[in-house]
Image (cartoon, rainbow, N blue to C red):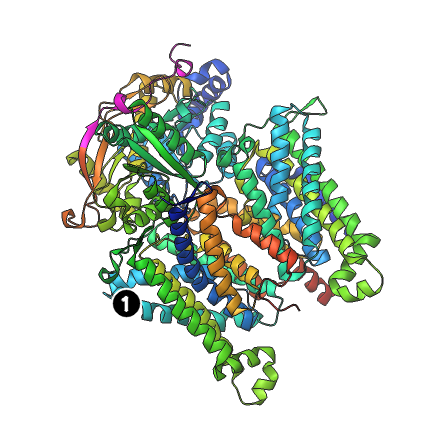
Amino acid sequence: MATFLGINLFGLFGQLLVGLINGSFYALLSLGLAIIFGLLKIINFAQGAMYMLGAFGAWLALNHLGINYWAALVLVPLAVGAIGILLERVLVRPIAHEDHLYSLLLTFGIALMLQGLFTHLFGSSGMPYAIPDELKGGTRLPFMYLPDYRAWIIVASAVVCGGTWWMIEKTRLGAYLRAGTENPQLMQAFGINVPLMVTLTFGFGVALAGFAGVMAAPVYSVSPEMGSNLLIVVFAIVVIGGMGSIGGAILTGLGMGIVEGLTKYFYPEASTTVIFLVMVIVLLLKPAGLFGKEA
Amino acid sequence: MKAMQKSLMTAAVVAATALSGAAQAEGISDDKVKIGVLADMGGVYADICGPGCVTAVEMAVEDFGGSVLGKPIEVISADDQLKPDVGSAKVRQWIESEQVDTVAGLVSSAVVGAATKVLTDNKKIALISTAASNAFTTSSCSPYNVHWTYNVTAVANGTVKPMVQAGKKKWFFITADYAFGHALEKVATDVVEQNQGEVVGAVRAPLGTTDFSSYVLQAQASGADVVALANAGADTVNSLKTAAEFGLTQTADVAGLLVFTPNAQAMDPSTAGGMTLTTGFYWDYDDATRAWSARFKERHGAIPAMGHAGAYSMTMHYLKAVEAAGTDDSDAVMAKMKEMKPDDFFARNATLRADGRMVHDMYTVKIKNPDERRDGDDIFKVVDVLAGDQVYEPMLPECNFAKS
Amino acid sequence: MNDKKLYLALFILALAAPAVLYPVFLMKVLCFALFACAFNLLLGFAGLLSFGHAAFLGTGGYVTGYLMINAGLTPELGILAGTLAAGLLGAVYGKLAVRREGIYFAMVTLALAQLAFFFYLQAPFTGGEDGLQGVPRGELFGFIDLSNNLAMYYFVLAIFVFGFWLIRRTVHSPFGQVLKAIRENEPRAISLGYNVNDYKWLAFVISSALAGLAGSTKTLVFQLASLNDVHWHLSGEVVLMTLVGGMGTLLGPLVGAGAIVTIQNYLSGGELGNYIHIILGAIFVVCVLAFRSGIVGQFQKMLKQNF
């Protein structure tokens, strides 16, 4: 086996690839949070709960409605997005003009309620969800066995992240969106329905979390706690990337997946902490995050 | 009038004798036996010993007849929120202001460690059903601890020993990075080495890790025959899912050292099927277990996990001992509990040792494949019954409370 | 003047409380109230949201617990050591954190607190998730036995009164006025020639030392220090307490801590434990939507309107 400085290189390649896979998953999760913060200035702490809803949605769809994974991948994010729209209209909008702190606390409360509700309804242990038949199996690479489902995570994440980035940064719709959040009065005067746009953007950001939830269902435990474990990490990614930067969140998600993967190899105990170390260092050196604009 | 005077007189006499210290050992204190159930009502362990443990204890009280020595039995319960300070404060409050005689349930080892200290200080019996640590009858043993359902030693011995003896010599551990995981890894490592096996590697994954693929790759690269999961709950589910996905289950055996029925139900049968593990109870073992489990399921809504059945069994044994001792005084009851042999649908070939360890038959089970299952509750196939003294650690001399 | 009467009435109430309520419960309320008051000094009076205050509570607790078990310190020295340690950590963390503002300040404190959590998780002396168990309460000044709950309660009450007094002094001092000026209009304070970061830093150190004092006291009360004391959930809980009580009011955190601890205590007894997350979450939502000024803030508003 190839080694370098006593490190097994094949092993390292494997870890890097696994880190990249996790990174693309993180990117997917961060994306929704980054959109909601970047465009709406709302800190959505319920994003983890929405991810959990997505995973449970996939399970419910399969077991109670007979909807398979592929259909769930489309339908569940729509349903979760609809819930997001409802939340925005009923709960978030009344405090939209208040300090960021309040949206953070409000959505944290919503997350607690959802998590408690699902523990109550479905128990704390979680639900089984099988990998769809089309994606069972894998490919044997020289340095590791790559399950098809993990490859699919990279593809799906690249398509969704790339598409979203393109839509917001490069299309007319995205331009309206950015302008509408920069200067709502002006856009309103141009005849654009800004409140509707805000609601739809929130719904879209939340739907992305729902999508990530469906993606996660076959590989991770579908349980009420699944979102709260990840949320704080994903939140850190958005902060490191620069709150408001869509591209920053995507790139940081990928990068942190790799950093975390390497930590899991060399010092596994610290793998959930390393991201906070990075966050401290980045914020002290670059106050607005890696890709954020200085205020 | 006369009758009333008489009853007033007796009341006065009873009060007077109750006040004099010597008489306290006799009879039931405060005119009732009160059992506090401390468990995880809404957290990650809620399914393995939460509301279900309360139900199990209540069932035992009802089956016993609701009263002992003519005095009513009362059950109260509280949520420990998995926090040692919350749990120990609750126990203290129960003892100091609610006349609780014993505390049952007891899930997370950290909470149980704190709670048993308070109980021992106050000479009250701890009926531990679901905690995994073996400390309560070894390093922090106490004359007031009763540890009923299982412990890390029993599950490690039960699962690891047969595999090493069958020639699976090289072991790799994926361990949850906290005291419980470390304890499980240590006990299992000892078993591996005593049987001429070898531990080729171990990783410590932080509690609540979502993605185990990195650790699975490391396990794969180690060339181990067996990859042991020294973790619990969602960690076990996540690590096993990933192991199956990355093809680890095809090149090595994966052994979940601690798996409760709700965890097994949370795993997709096509990935978990075939895995061997050790449990203190399985609902579908024989008619007696099925009969009790059916009653439990009717009230609780799900099949019992081993901690639930243990909670019922130990409560029953406690109440029988109170009756036999003629008092709820902890020392007298404890002596009776250890003297009488526990024997019911749960406790088979059982003894409650002088150190408080209840030693009973354990079961080696295999998780059923999808095509072997009748329904969602049909998850294990019992492949072997292990005599208790083969799997539990021997009593430590310093924990033998019979001598003193 | 009216204030003084109110404080006196509350103090007498606190003196008599153990006759009616369970002392350990009261001590828990006081410990969390002190913690919330310390937190509120930053959020309410300096406008700084720390999302990592549990690190200081936990540090106080661990240091006190460790020294009480291993060095046989008396309780007052143990608490002093814990408080100093938390203040010291606060001095370091504060130095780093005050360089950032708003949500970034919150994030830096959160991240630093996670590093502290990791340290306590890994350090062998903390006992991992079992925590430091069996911390002796000891004898105050060498002759008052604190294992008696009542003696302990009055000791805790004295600590709380001291902490509260210190916060009140700080808020009403010229230093406190500058803090408020910074909260209201930071550029203006800078242009007036104040070194804003130094003021923030000092407020941070005082706040973290007092949080440590609360943690040290809590460790003595419960005779244990555990990882829950440094977990970010606790950092979130103290935000909730302050919000419910009323941020920026002196008594708000006390009322908020009392309310939340009571609710938790009530819910933890019995079957309602099932609903604890749902109910706590609902309190968050209702508070943010309807009572942003908190119980005490709302009360003050009503008083102002009626008189």
The chain holding disc 1 is A
Residue B330 picture location, percent across and down:
41, 21
Quarter the N terminus of chain B occupies: top left
C166 or B251, nearer to the observer: B251
Task: Find out whether residue A211 is within the magenta segment.
Answer: no
Q: Which contiguous range is marked in magenta? A: B384-404
When the figure is inspected, residue B292 is found, relative to residue C101, above or below; the finding is above
Of A179 and A191, which appears nearest the observer?
A179
Furthest residue to the bottom? A190
Which structural element holds mark 1?
helix
Residue B116 falls left or right of residue B263 = right
Number of marks in picture: 1
* Percent position of residue B374, x then y: 15, 49
Q: Is residue B319 visible?
A: no
Residue drawn 57% across the image and 31% down it = C223
Where residue B90 appears, as percent x and y from the top left, is: 49, 36
Label 1 sits on residue: A70
The C terminus of chain B is located in which quarter? top left
Q: Residue at x 65, y 34 (%)?
A: C153
Going 58% across and 51% down the picture, which residue do you hit? C111
Answer left or right for A59 relative to C31: left
Q: Residue furthest top?
A: B403
Q: Eyeballing the image, is A191 above or below A266?
A: below
Q: Is residue C100 visible?
A: yes
Q: Residue at x 50, y 15 (%)?
A: B21
| Horizontal and vertical percent position of residue B302 | 27, 47
- Identify the image quadrant of residue A62: bottom left
